[in-house]
Amino acid sequence: MNVFHVVGTRPNFMKVAPVMNALKTRAHVVQTLVHTGQHYDANMSDVFFEQLGIPAPDVNLAVGSGTQARQTAEIMTRLEPVLLDRVPDLVLVYGDVNSTVAAALVCAKLGVRVGHVEAGLRSFDRTMPEEINRLVTDQLADLLFTPSEDADFNLRKEGIPAEKIFRVGNVMIDSLVKLLPSAQGQKQIGLPQNFALVTLHRPANVDDSAILKRILQSLLEVSKDLSVIFPAHPRTRKRIADFGLQAGQLHVLDPLSYVEFLGLQSRATVVITDSGGIQEETTYLGIPCLTLRENTERPITVSLGTNVLVGRDPDKLRVELSRILAGQAKKGTIPPLWDGHAGERIAAVLANYP
Ligand code: UD1
């Protein structure tokens, strides 16, 4: 069986690693890795390949940045001849980024079977590009691998037949479980005892100068109570510079490697973020997470985990933060099947796939 994996962005890399690893042991499987090049900076891509033990891509489409339409179209245009030439039996796509939907569309038109890893998540907010990517990808996929029960429920409601849906758990947690010991073993020189770890990159939070300014002001308030460590996505750094905003007391860093960031997450007093994956990682680690979004496609991190949605309301952020600093952080549990073996469960499904 000739299996292709198509990835393109930082959050795809920790999802593909455990699946490739699990499929390595299956004699009937030949794997090909395609990197679309949606993320191309060394600290957004290469370092993740090294740390996660992902083999060098067989094909790099080198699409780079662009508008939503241009980037998606470019991935489709460059992927189509590769698939026509190499004729995979199945293409696996990951998460909810432009690379995911672009690959799913090309496959569907060529009649190549697609498996979607991390299927079924819904924020019910179609202003997010990722929500469009999720909806379209799931309609096109032949195999849908879900992380949690809510995802199965969403898919069934959208008319996806039950026999296409496989609840395998959370593949990203597989990578976390594997690399947590080395992340915690790292020396952290000069790290304060208590600190807030911040990430921010959603277009809705960083592309509007007034909104970004208000968020930075809230974070400056936070920094009066504890140090704020802020590894900034290239998009966010660019916006802060373009809008002439000041990050003052915040410790703004370049994007960190997977292991460095995981080490910081596991030691943080609180994580403040608008990322999707970090809501899940903090839930697994039992670290309080305040999410700067009005909604989440990962509601299980709120119902079972440590996540609290604070939106963009500075008062809510302040109240939740004081609760955490007073030792009254929400206690969470780890959702079922977030156990480090999701990749193996995907491999087991594929072993029985004709
Ligand atoms: C993408 C995903 C988002 C995911 C995020 C993780 C989509 C629609 N969005 O958003 O879901 O959470 O990745 O990081 O697919 N840039 C660089 N170097 C890079 C990559 C990007 O400088 O290696 C800058 C460029 O200015 C680029 C901007 O970041 O225009 C945005 O990159 P893009 O891939 O379009 O979207 P992300 O915001 O990273």
Image (cartoon, grey):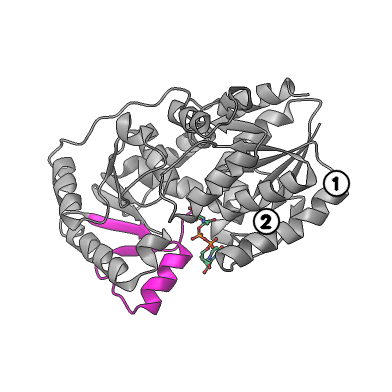
At x 63%, y 22%, the residue is 163
Query: Is residue 131 inside the magenta stretch?
Result: no
Crowd around label 2: few <14 · some 14–19 · many ≥20 (10 Å): many
Q: Can residue 96 be seen in this view?
A: no
Q: Is residue 230 visible?
A: yes
* Relative vertical location of residue 256 with respect to residue 104 in this rendering, above or below: below
Disc 1 secondary structure class: helix
Q: Quadrant of residue 284?
A: top left
* Relative vertical location of residue 351 with respect to residue 69 in this rendering, above or below: above
Mark 1 lies on residue = 86
Looking at the rendered image, the quarter that the N terminus falls into is top right
Q: Which amino acid does label 2 sit on?
A: Thr
Disc 2 secondary structure class: loop
Sequence-first tag of 1 and 2: 2
Looking at the rendered image, the quarter that the C terminus falls into is top right
Relative to 261, 80 lies left or right:
right
Q: Quadrant of residue 309?
A: top left
Question: Residue 170: x, y in percent?
Answer: 50, 32
Query: Is residue 238 inside the magenta stretch?
Result: yes
Farthest right residue in view: 85
- Front residue of 350/182: it is 350
Question: Residue 337: x, y in percent?
Answer: 48, 23
Mark number displayed over residue 99: none
* Relative vertical location of residue 258 with respect to residue 306 in this rendering, above or below: below
Mark 2 lies on residue = 36
Question: Residue 211: x, y in percent?
Answer: 29, 66
Q: Give the range drawn in magenta.
A: 227-256
Q: Determine if the C-beta at disc 1 is less than 8 A from ligand 1.
A: no
Question: Residue 92: x, y in percent?
Answer: 68, 39
Crowd around label 1: few <14 · some 14–19 · many ≥20 (10 Å): few
